[in-house]
Amino acid sequence: MIPARVIKPQRLTEPPRDIVVIGASRGGVEAIIGIVAALPLSLQSTLLIVLHISPTHAGLFPAVLSRAGPLPAEHGRNGTRIERGRIYVAPPDHHMTVGPIGFIRLDQGPKEHHTRPAADPLFRSAASVFGGERYGSRVIGIVLTGGGSDGTQGLIAIEQASGLAIVQDPGDARDPSMPMSALLHDNPDLCLPLSEIPGVIIRLSSVSRGSA
């Protein structure tokens, strides 16, 4: 495993980190299912997911995630206020971002990294809305398996807003390109095999209460 920097112990205990944004591409279906299947119904976090996937199959992905674990999953809809204990998946051909006070926004702006949806717009918006001094920061950004470099710049934005950055161990990824890009251009807090990522999400959300 490629080691990430050694972080201060309080970085893994500061409450709450209950906004989890995930980006993945090739191999991402299996990786995301693996994370979702290991999360409990009592999870006090919101998951927002961008997956590069064929539009033909993208419509089925929320139903697949709902079957894989106890948390309900749905496509993000414009104007929906995010709720804890739910999973929101970016719909085909739309960037999904988070607006002020936690409302989902969808748009068909320019493709990033030759794809729409892309992880970077979601990551940047989460850092802006839930990061910094006001929230201190509630965001966990996770880059999983996939080709290209999507998620790298967004992960940097999350770290700059005091969020926590996690990268899947490239040796554990079906396609190591996205994790390697994040490691080469950023200095994430943790580089972990997929099997260890759900435990971090659970640990950091267990102290949070109330609505998102």
Image (cartoon, rainbow, N blue to C red):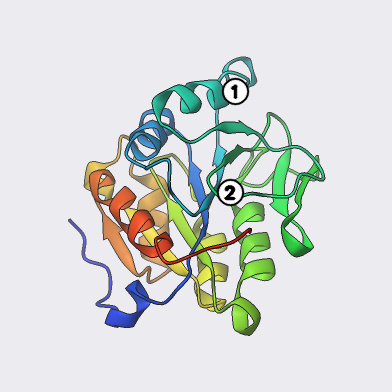
Percent across and percent down for residue 206 are 39, 61
The residue carrying pointer 2 sits among few (fewer than 14), some (14 to 19) or many (20 or more) residues within 10 Å by Cα, namely many
27 vs 91, nearest the viewer: 91
61 relative position to 15: left or right: right
Q: CA distance from mark 2 to mark 1?
A: 15 Å
Q: Quadrant of residue 1?
A: bottom left
Give the residue displayed 61% in from the left and 67% down from the top.
Answer: 127
Q: Are marks 2 and 1 in contact (CB under 8 Å)?
A: no
> Up-down: is 116 above or below 168?
above
First along the sequence among labels 2 and 1: 1
Check disc 2 and report the residue beneath it. Answer: 119
Check disc 1 and report the residue beneath it. Answer: 58
Q: Amino acid at mark 2?
A: Ala
Query: What kind of element bears circle 1?
Result: helix
> Up-down: is 171 above or below 184?
above
| Rendered-image quadrant of the C terminus | bottom right
Q: Amino acid at mark 1?
A: Ala
Percent across and percent down for residue 73 are 56, 32
82 vs 4, nearest the viewer: 82
Residue lying furthest top: 56
Give the residue displayed 80% in from the left and 41% down from the top.
Answer: 78
The residue carrying pointer 1 sits among few (fewer than 14), some (14 to 19) or many (20 or more) residues within 10 Å by Cα, namely some
Percent across and percent down for residue 45 are 50, 54
> Up-down: is 33 above or below 44?
above
Percent across and percent down for residue 67 are 45, 22
135 vs 173, nearest the viewer: 135
> Up-down: is 148 above or below 10?
above
142 relative position to 171: left or right: right
94 relative position to 175: left or right: right
Give the residue displayed 44% in from the left and 54% down from the top.
Answer: 142
Query: What kind of element bears circle 2?
Result: helix
